[in-house]
DNA sequence: AACAAAAGTTAAAGCGGTTTCATTTATTGA
DNA sequence: TCAATAAATGAAACCGCTTTAACTTTTGTT
């Protein structure tokens, strides 16, 4: 049925070792033998059995990638980037959605943690149990953490500078002349959300301004909608809102629209992540673009460094986000929405 | 370093065969032996080497899933469903994004098509080269096609009845009293898009009505925006627009909003797919929910049937979509937008 | 032309499991 | 109690490839 390396060897009139050599592009094969082998491979439509290869080589050529869900655009962009980066290196990606499902998605039962299944793993989940890390360390599986940091361990990680992102966004608004700047940050348990708010505070403090108001909630449309709706009801709106992510921003704009409050004429909005809709729905959302592709590439690089035995202790590579001003941010109005003339 | 089955056997004072038996939950193991083995496994923190298992068993326990991209919510929902379904069966998912990337993403180089890498594959891509299918058939790898059909072959597939979806959506509008119904369908090369439009036409014809207008374009926000903007400029708007998917619907509403045309007071809009934003942005979008989870489950079932040797020729399982009326569809206005009093 | 060095090749021993099949041990019935 | 039968176990072969070490051929030198 399916041809094995022995069939190829026989047909080519050489030993299996030679066949193995040409498969693995070893140099010590005479051109004539190589040719014969190639011919036999073609004729038999032979493809090496990867399980056998993995077993013999002691490595699987697959890299695991842990993610929290399959919906977050940023996550998915990194996944795509990782996938491409691995492909060029002859590796395969094994994706594993963790946590989001039944919380009983126990580490032990997970693909990525099965001995020898993967040669290394990339962790791209904002919240993770400590035991992912300890489990990986125990098994001596190389791994790197992406878009997150965990301090008490000596691990390498790739992060995007969310503090800078929050800072830049605030500067942008400040430079436009805003002083009454509000913030709807992401949840407290996410480091990225925390950092963005920190960046905001830093920038404000730097110019001696107080945040107009700070609220926090999930990275979700409803968060933005609900909070802004409340502010409107309270007649207490800043002239600009910094949103923890684009979902929040969309929700905020949704609430404003319902009350006929114009963006950016009456109030400026800025998001974070450059969601696909940000540049398509009107007005185009000013936001921050994270270097997702680069995160993936650097993550893979760091992982391979580690797999090659390069000693990497607590190395963190910090990448920078880029602010993208579009149509939802402009100079503040002469008067605040609820201010009397 | 890492414990093998031999280490476990030695420690437990039994043969490797017995260990293998307890690992594989064979029944013919004395309780006492089983206990000893379990203990040894625990102590040695043993985990079977999956490459060795695959090699010996002649199967990998991984199922490949071919998808066009990592961004489409429907696709991703199916992926998630498949992942869960496989997990319960002790299988793993190998995702492979195809085509979207460099078009040179050759079949032969693909993970899924590597001999023995996967025990079966699920194809979930609206457009695929014929050679995926022939390649799979050649290698005798079980596979099923999801959300698409390919006629000249005897393969099994899981499809959602898009004709019915298009039909239902039209009926909904018809029953609300609309007669001037327009349609912005998806691209011609997608069977699903084609079918939805067909359903629309069928329903119209059934009541002896002519489509007000039909346009086609990519499943994209911009398509809806551009086409509706044009219609507005031409002062030729139907009282209801059936959109090929939610992206188009969002774009359509975006254009209407810019011209202060109210939804649903002035015009009704209905989408397709139940995008996460459909129920969050206001007004909540009426749309059609596809049974993504069921598609995944049925797909896995069908694949396993096939892997078990069940002869399945050209079996197609058809699932039904469900219309979700929300706030963007209502009775037509007394007068069309551009009609004089 | 002779010989050392370099290049090419292979037999054999794994890699870590599973699967017969024969063998040993336990259970049952009379 | 003893054969007959069922249950539990293990020896050996095998899955398909890679790697090591030894061996053979080719190439280069003088």
Image (cartoon, coloured by chain):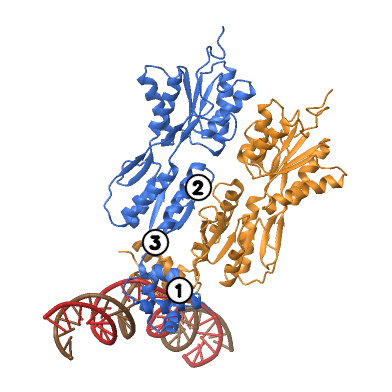
Chain colours: A orange, B blue, C red, D brown
Labels 2 and 1 within one chain = no
Labels 2 and 3 within one chain = yes
Q: Residue at x 48, y 69 (%)?
A: A24
Figure quadrant of the C terminus of chain B:
top right
In this figure, which residue is indicated by the disc labeled 3? Answer: B115
Q: Decide if residue B107 is in sight here.
A: no
**In this picture, residue A83 sits left or right of residue B115:** right
Instruction: From the top left corner, tell me how far across and down residue B261 is, in percent.
Output: 60, 20
Instruction: From the top left corner, tell me how far across and down residue A327 is, in percent.
Output: 71, 33
In this figure, which residue is indicated by the disc labeled 1? Answer: A56
Instruction: From the top left corner, tell me how far across and down residue B144 is, in percent.
Output: 36, 49
Q: Which residue is more in the foreground, B44 or A55? A: B44
The residue sitting at the right extreme is: A208
Q: Residue at x 62, y 72 (%)?
A: A309
Check the residue under mark 2 and report the chain it is in: B
| For discs 2 and 1, the disc positioned in front in the rendered view | 1
Q: Quadrant of residue A14?
A: bottom left
Q: Is residue B205 above or below residue B310?
A: above
In this figure, which residue is indicated by the disc labeled 2? Answer: B103
Contact between labelled residues 1 and 2, with CB atoms less than 8 Å apart: no
Circle number at residue B182: none
Labels 1 and 3 within one chain = no
Q: How many numbered markers are drawn?
A: 3
Q: Which residue is more in the foreground, A26 or A52? A: A52
Q: Which residue is more in the foreground, B305 or A193? A: A193
Tell me the SS state at disc 2. loop
| For discs 2 and 3, the disc positioned in front in the rendered view | 3
Mark 3 crowdedness (10 Å alpha carbons): few <14, some 14-19, many ≥20: some
Q: Quadrant of residue B140?
A: bottom left
- Distance, label 1 to label 3, CA atoms, is 17 Å
Check the residue under mark 1 and report the chain it is in: A
Choose the circle earlier in sequence order: 2 or 3: 2
């Amino acid at each position: 049925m399916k041809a094995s390396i022995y069939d190829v060897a026989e047909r080519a009139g050489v030993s299996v070792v030679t066949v193995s050599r040409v498969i693995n592009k070893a140099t010590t094969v005479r051109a004539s033998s190589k040719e014969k082998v190639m011919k036999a491979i073609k004729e038999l439509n032979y493809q090496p059995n990867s399980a056998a290869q993995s077993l013999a080589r002691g490595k699987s050529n697959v890299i695991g990638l842990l993610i929290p869900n399959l919906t977050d655009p940023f996550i998915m962009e990194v996944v795509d980037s990782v996938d491409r980066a691995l492909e060029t290196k002859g590796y395969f990606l094994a994706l594993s959605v963790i946590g989001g499902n039944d919380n009983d998605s126990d580490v032990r039962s997970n693909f990525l943690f099965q001995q020898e299944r993967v040669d290394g793993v990339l962790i791209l989940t904002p919240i993770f149990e400590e035991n992912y890390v300890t489990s990986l360390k125990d098994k001596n599986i190389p791994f790197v953490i992406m878009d997150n940091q965990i301090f008490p361990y000596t691990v390498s990680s790739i992060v995007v500078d969310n503090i800078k992102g929050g800072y830049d966004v605030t500067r942008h608004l400040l430079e436009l002349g805003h002083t009454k700047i509000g913030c709807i940050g992401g949840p407290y348990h996410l480091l990225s959300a925390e950092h963005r708010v920190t960046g905001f505070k830093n920038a404000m403090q730097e110019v001696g301004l107080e945040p107009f108001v700070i609220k926090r909630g999930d990275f979700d449309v409803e968060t933005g909608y609900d909070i802004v709706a409340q502010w409107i009801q309270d007649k207490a709106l800043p002239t600009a809102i910094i949103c923890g992510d684009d979902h929040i921003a969309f929700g905020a704009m949704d609430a404003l629209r319902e009350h006929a409050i114009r963006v950016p004429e009456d109030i400026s909005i800025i998001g974070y992540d450059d969601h696909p809709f940000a540049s398509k729905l009107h007005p185009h959302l000013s936001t921050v673009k994270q270097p997702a592709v680069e995160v993936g590439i650097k993550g893979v690089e760091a992982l391979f460094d580690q797999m090659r035995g390069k000693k990497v202790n607590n190395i963190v590579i910090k990448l920078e986000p880029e602010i993208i001003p579009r149509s939802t941010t402009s100079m503040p109005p002469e008067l605040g929405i609820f201010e009397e003339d």
